[in-house]
Image (cartoon, grey):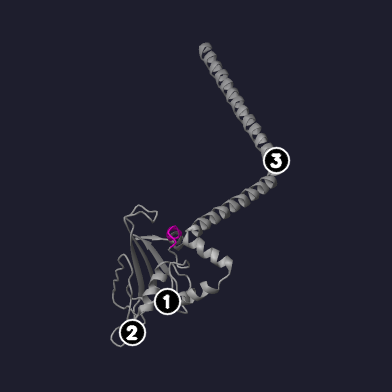
Amino acid sequence: MLGFKTFARQTEIQFDGGVTAIVGPNGSGKTNIVDAVKWVLGSGQARDIRGRKMEEVIYAGGERRSRASFAEVTMVFDNSAGRLPVDYHEVAIKRRVERDGESDYFLNGTRVRRRDLIHLLASTGLTVDSYAIIDQHDIEHIVVCSPAERRQLLEEGAQVRGVKARRQEAVQKLQELAANLLRLEDLKSELAPRLDALRVQAAAAREASEATARLELLRGSIVWEEWREARDAHRRASTQA
């Protein structure tokens, strides 16, 4: 983390296997660590990380340090088991925001779209709106939620939601293609009469071009005959003289 909320300086936290507990007094930044995880995973709402505007995640400054011009969080995963569908043994996901509020996402140093990052993480169930990250109010919600919401929770845990999202996207693309084909058919019907007229005009133009070529050929032949006759007459006159 660098310039993210209260973490003005670059801060690295390593989570090894097993259970890790983060403890500290109130106001020490424990919740900001959770916010950083949510944020780098693609949180699109400032309220998800206890803010009003996304640029509020940038360190605002203090008595001994001026405010930061940007904030960035990088999360590095050990992908030696291949749980993420990319050809890297180590996957680094980074999000950076400047004071204009626009975020940039990076995958192993390459700029990517937020949507691509969300799809990549969805294959593991690790998304900002999944139950991989559970707030206190989320636990209360699970207790009182409806059967349909519990089903959604189970699908998230079984990584079914990512498959459904990709299927829905594929269905949407097919619908868009079908709509485009329908528009093309309508356009074809509209242009058909004009196309017939253009064919007639093209045929007439070809005939005119062929007639012009024949006329030029005839003119050339006439000029040649006139020149030949004039030449022969000149020779005869020269002989008689």
Picture disc at residue 55: 1
Q: Quick one: 5 or 96, which is closer to the camera? A: 5
Query: Left or right: where does residue 140 sit relative to residue 31?
Result: right
Between disc 1 and disc 2, whose residue precedes? 2
- Looking at the image, which residue is at 69% across and 47% down? 190
Q: Residue furthest right?
A: 193
Find residue 78 and report its horizontal and vertical position in percent. Answer: 32, 59
Amino acid at circle 1: Glu
Q: Quick one: 154 or 201, which is closer to the camera? A: 154
Find residue 106 and report its horizontal and vertical position in percent. Answer: 37, 62
Q: Secondary structure at mark 3?
A: helix
Amino acid at circle 2: Pro
Residues at badges 1 and 2 in contact (C-beta under 8 Å)?
no
Disc 3: CA contacts within 10 A as few (<14), some (14-19) or many (>=20): few
Q: Secondary structure at mark 2?
A: loop
Query: Left or right: where does residue 203 sit relative to residue 44?
Result: right
- Asked whether the viewer can see residue 28, the reply is yes
**Residue 122 inside the magenta-drawn segment:** yes
Say which residue label 3 marks.
Answer: 197
Q: Which residues are magenta?
A: 119-125
**Residue 105 inside the magenta-drawn segment:** no
